[in-house]
Image (cartoon, helix red, strand yellow):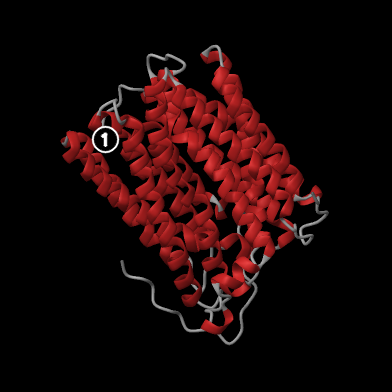
Amino acid sequence: MTLPTPSRPAAALPASPLPSPWVLSAFWFGTAFLWLMLLTIYMPAHVVGFMGEGNKGTYLGLLNAIGAAIALVVPPLVGAHSDRTGRRLPYLRLGVGVNLAGLAVMGAAVALLAGSAGFWVYVLGFVLVQLGNNYATAPYSALIPQLVPPEQRGRYSGAMGTLQALGQLLGAAAGIAIGSHYGVSLPFVLMGLLLLGAAVVTLRGVVERAEQVAPTAPGEVMSWRELFAHAPFRWVFITRVLFALGQYSVQPFLQYYAGDVLRQKDPVMSSSLMLACIVVASIISAVLGGRLSDRIGRKPVIYFAGTVMTVMALLLLAAPSFAVALVLAFCFGLGFGAFTSVDWALGADAMPSKSSYARDMGIWHVAFVAPQFVNLPMGGLLDWGNRQGENFGYVLVFGSAALFFLLGVVLVRNVPESKRHGSAGQG
């Protein structure tokens, strides 16, 4: 892929225009729709279609681990280059194009191929999706800390969390509407259209001039060692990893849980209903959590969110019926939405240097995606546990998720929260 060339620094840097929080975060709507539909609804079903039931957890975990490897490497590198060029939006344009090409390859594999040969072509398409999406999002992630004043970041982060939740809700609704009887091309067409449309909104609504972002000189950028020596960044990174580990321990296998544990005849539709409950609840708590964090601090909201997610992950194991599972999923969503609304603001507050926003946000983005590596051991653990006893694998996987959430709640107390955004709530 060709990287944009550096722009010439300007003699004076004017104040950056502040776009609407909804326009600035619009691309997250399309990305959330894409990842919910792909990772939690259709990819699990496609893996079973290609490779069968016996090793579904292992192959799904492998696929997600491949994606995590890409997401681990690409954002810091592309983010650092974005800081050197002083540009953000050209990366978004190119990344979306590669992402769309990957969706086309995946759709072709599902429509035209079968067995292991089809699976590996499907993997190739998924690699392109991951490359393109991560190429786009690392520089794009820098726009909130770059453009938004600290005292408004909770509001902007709340808008971002709301748009992510709306994108996820629409993805879940599409899964419910299509169910197991979907045309093989329709899901990929929907993902591509929503991603492209959301990208266009952001690209047209955010004004970026060549002189808007000062290209960085090598000496102005903190080393990785200095970055992690900065306590706010280090602890935000660690706690974000723990919450993501909890999320990715369960999320890819939710469809299998609906079929194996809850005995649902249409796991695709049933898991989509559960996801819809999670997302509706997260919309309710996202805006409230973001605005509340500007007044009382980020960490109290994280404490509430993480505690709720921990308890609900455990209770789902004992759900006596699908109806009860839907209620528990809704409660989990209240915690997840509150966490999402504050998470980005907490990360933006922790950035130590204005000279390397995209590089540093790219590194922080690793805390979102590198934990997807847990899918591989969790998928193997799921298959192994289920061979030991009926659905014992789900006890191991959901129990691990609860433990990760609990550790995140405990360790977020170590984050020396910035008071630039208002009244900080110290732990």
Q: Position of residue 249 (x, y in %)?
A: 49, 37
For image coordinates 45% across by 28% down, the residue present is 254
Left or right, 349 with respect to 37, comes to right
Residue, x 32% and y 31% (percent of image)? 56
x and y percent of residue 321 in the render? 53, 12
Specify whether residue 150 is in view. Answer: yes
The answer to which of 309 and 80 lies nearer the viewer is 309
Residue 167 visible, this orientation: no
Badge 1: residue crowd in 10 Å (few <14, some 14–19, many ≥20): some
SS type, badge 1: loop
> In which quarter of the view is residue 375 placed?
top left
Residue farthest to the front, as pictured = 388
User: Along the horizontal axis of the image, is 34 left or right of 361?
Assistant: left
On screen, residue 8 versus residue 96, left or right, reads right
Find residue 78 and report its horizontal and vertical position in percent.
43, 66
Q: Which residue is mark 1?
A: 185
The residue type indicated by label 1 comes to: Ser
Location of residue 352 in the rendering, given as x and y in whole percent from the top left corner: 65, 69
> Please, is residue 369 above or below residue 254 in the view?
below
Q: Is residue 285 above or below residue 93?
A: above
Q: Residue at left 41%, top 47%? A: 195
Q: How many marks?
A: 1
In the rendered view, would you say 144 is above or below 81?
Answer: above
Residue 402 higher or lower than 76, as above or below: above
Of residues 11 and 220, the one drawn nearer to the viewer in this rendering: 220
Q: Is residue 320 left or right of residue 151?
A: left
